[in-house]
Image (cartoon, grey):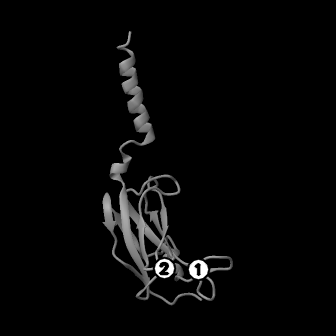
Amino acid sequence: MIQPIVPRCIVLSALLCALSGCGQGSASAVVHGSVKMNGQPLANAEVRLVPKGNPNLAAHAVTTDQAGNFTIQGKSASDRPVQPGSYVVLVSKLASEGGASGGMGMKNVVPPLYSDQNRSPLKAEIQKGDNNLPAYDLVGSPKR
């Protein structure tokens, strides 16, 4: 009588593991990079990785530190880890007229080209494991 229960438990365990995403973490990636504007570190900028042509990939966003560096790891707002694939990189930074970051009435100080998914020249090919992207040096006059 006990023997029929064991195969059912194994099947149920395997099914639950598959549904919960067991093993997906092994294909995830960690992304390191930096952003500059006209050669200067771009602190407190939002960097977004937007999947290019693959609806199965999730978008990810992170804020740069004071040196313009960023790391994207773990999961996105959609609760999906960073997966290998092709991404468009978008950069924006909201600042007041005086240059402070955040708040109401802010403007994007990064040229619009870099925050437009269809025109951004910034790309990333993400592989499984650690990815060290080349520094992105944005060119143009900051919008005031």
Is residue 28 toward the left or the right of residue 118 in the image?
Answer: left
Specify the quadrant of the image occupied by residue 132. Answer: bottom left
Count the marks: how many? 2
Q: Which SS class for mark 1?
A: loop
Residue 63 drawn above or below residue 96: above
Is residue 142 toward the left or the right of residue 89 in the image?
Answer: right
Q: Residue at x 43, y 63 (%)?
A: 52
Q: Which SS class for mark 2?
A: loop
Residue 101: assigned label = 1
- Bin the neighbour count of mark 2 within 10 Å (Cα to Cα): few under 14, some 14-19, many 20 and up: many
Quadrant location of the N terminus in the rendered image:
top left
Q: Residue at x 59, y 89 (%)?
A: 144
x then y, percent, for residue 65: 46, 75
Residue 124: assigned label = none
x then y, percent, for residue 140: 48, 88
Residue 61 drawn above or below residue 22: below
x then y, percent, for residue 28: 36, 54
The amino acid on which the numbered mark 2 sits, given as a three-letter code, is Ala
- Bin the neighbour count of mark 1 within 10 Å (Cα to Cα): few under 14, some 14-19, many 20 and up: some
Q: Is residue 13 visible?
A: yes
Q: Nearer the viewer, residue 52 or 144?
A: 144
The amino acid on which the numbered mark 1 sits, given as a three-letter code, is Ser
Residue 43: assigned label = 2
The answer to whether the residue labelled 1 contacts the one labelled 2, judged by CB atoms less than 8 Å apart, is yes
Q: Residue at x 35, y 14 (%)?
A: 3
Specify the quadrant of the image occupied by residue 143. Answer: bottom right
Is residue 99 toward the left or the right of residue 129 in the image?
Answer: right
Residue 87 drawn above or below residue 107: above
